[in-house]
Image (cartoon, rainbow, N blue to C red):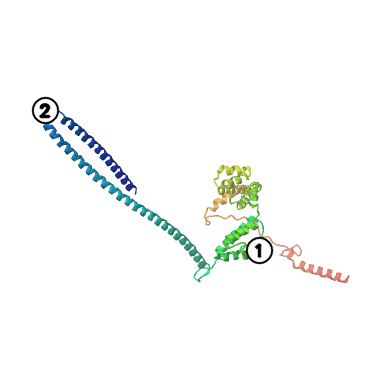
Amino acid sequence: FGNLGKRLDSRCRTTRRRSLIERDLRRSLIEEEEALTTQYNLRSAKGKGVAHSDEMGTSQGPKDLTEMVNKLATDVTTQEEALGNAAESFGKMKDEMKVLREQMAYLVAMNRALTDKVTALQAEVKELQVNNRTLQRQISVGGSDDQQARVDVQTPAKYNGTRDSRVIDNFLFQVEYYLDLQGVMGDDLQVKTAAMLLEGDAVAWWRRKRLDIQKGICTIDTFDDFQRELRTYFMPPNATRHAYRMVGELKHTGSLRDYVRAYQRLMLDVPDMQEQDKLNWFILGLQSWAQSEVERSNPETLEDAYVVAERLADTQRKSYTNAFKPSRKPDHGGKKDDRRERKDEPSTQRQVERRTFFRRNNNSHNIVLKCWFCDGNHLGRQCPQRVNRDNQTSSSRQSANAVQ
């Protein structure tokens, strides 16, 4: 269409130029004709002598003038024909432009219709993908015997209506995972399953909500609606403000790892806080030595600061352990070095030194045992006479005691 417009503009300019040239030619022809007529009249008004002397020139002048006029007339006719052809071509081009505009409008409308159809098809494809995943999940959960056994998921702890933002968030998080892993499909079934995990004040709240639903006061059709209504009723109104206050008041007073854990729990209550603000508050709550170490590492995100703090905690723990570790015992005369050297030797070449607990004199004679009680060849405590005498003494004592 751009080239067509340029062609039309060039043809229009050519037509205008031709019309201007034709107008100028007509004016010049009229002026020349008037000049020649005036000159001829002046010459004819002079004397016959002059007319006779110029008879040949005057007879030749009208012929030339007639030829020029005829030539100019022919040129004018040719220009008129060209102008007519140009006008006709311009009219045809206008008709073609009109047809092209209509075709362009039709193509634009068709393009919009195709865009709408493609959008509708994309929505249908997404819906089919969701349905396909749902069916696959249902089949994997427990449809046929060929599939694996369903994952044994522990039931989440029931919520009793405690007005604590962290407890509510943890409960809803666990319920959402429980519904997903158990393959609970359908909005109504998900809401009923979540309601079965309520107790105490939360059950009373749900019963009131059920009455409101029956009366048409409110609607809870999906699990998202259930979460929103539960948060609206049980979430403390100043939970976010209290969480921000706790972030500002949290300080590193005990162990570094305890501070990191406490700060991570607080970050769950302020999900909307900017990442840079989270990092700054974490560093400001540290002790001076830990703060300088973390700032020296120049962390860009909060996770980087967590990693640096965990490393500092590990370093602190190792230094504490080494401080109370018992010192090494002195090496007695290099015996440990000797033992280390002997360990490198093979067992067949290693000589084992046996320690003698009793001194023996190979040159001495055998010792003769002699009882001090009866001079027999035995020990005194093994003397039979002494044993009999001891038995007699004990029996006499028993009889004396009995008489008394």
Task: Give coordinates of residue 1: x percent, y percent.
Answer: 34, 49
Disc 1 residue crowd, few under 14, some 14–19, many 20+, Cα 10 Å: few
| Towards the viewer: 45 or 160 | 45
Task: Give coordinates of residue 375: x percent, y percent.
Answer: 74, 64
As drawn, 46 above or below 29: above
Q: Nearer the viewer, mark 1 or mark 2?
A: 2
> At 16% from the left edge and 30% from the top edge, which residue is drawn?
45
Judging from the image, what secondary structure is the residue with disc 2 in? helix
Residue picked out by circle 2: 49
Q: Amino acid at mark 1?
A: Arg
> At 83% from the left edge and 70% from the top edge, which residue is drawn?
398
Residue picked out by circle 1: 208
> At 45% from the left edge and 60% from the top edge, which residue is drawn?
120
| Towards the viewer: 5 or 39 | 39
Q: Quadrant of the C terminus?
A: bottom right
Left/right placement of residue 269 relative to residue 133 reads right
Left/right placement of residue 369 relative to residue 33 reads right
> At 77% from the left edge and 69% from the top edge, which residue is drawn?
388
Judging from the image, what secondary structure is the residue with disc 1 in? helix
**Can I make out residue 201 in this image?**
yes
Q: Amino acid at mark 2?
A: Gly
The reply to whether the C-beta atoms of the residues labelled 1 and 2 are less than 8 Å apart is no
| Towards the viewer: 200 or 29 | 29
The image shows a total of numbered marks equal to 2
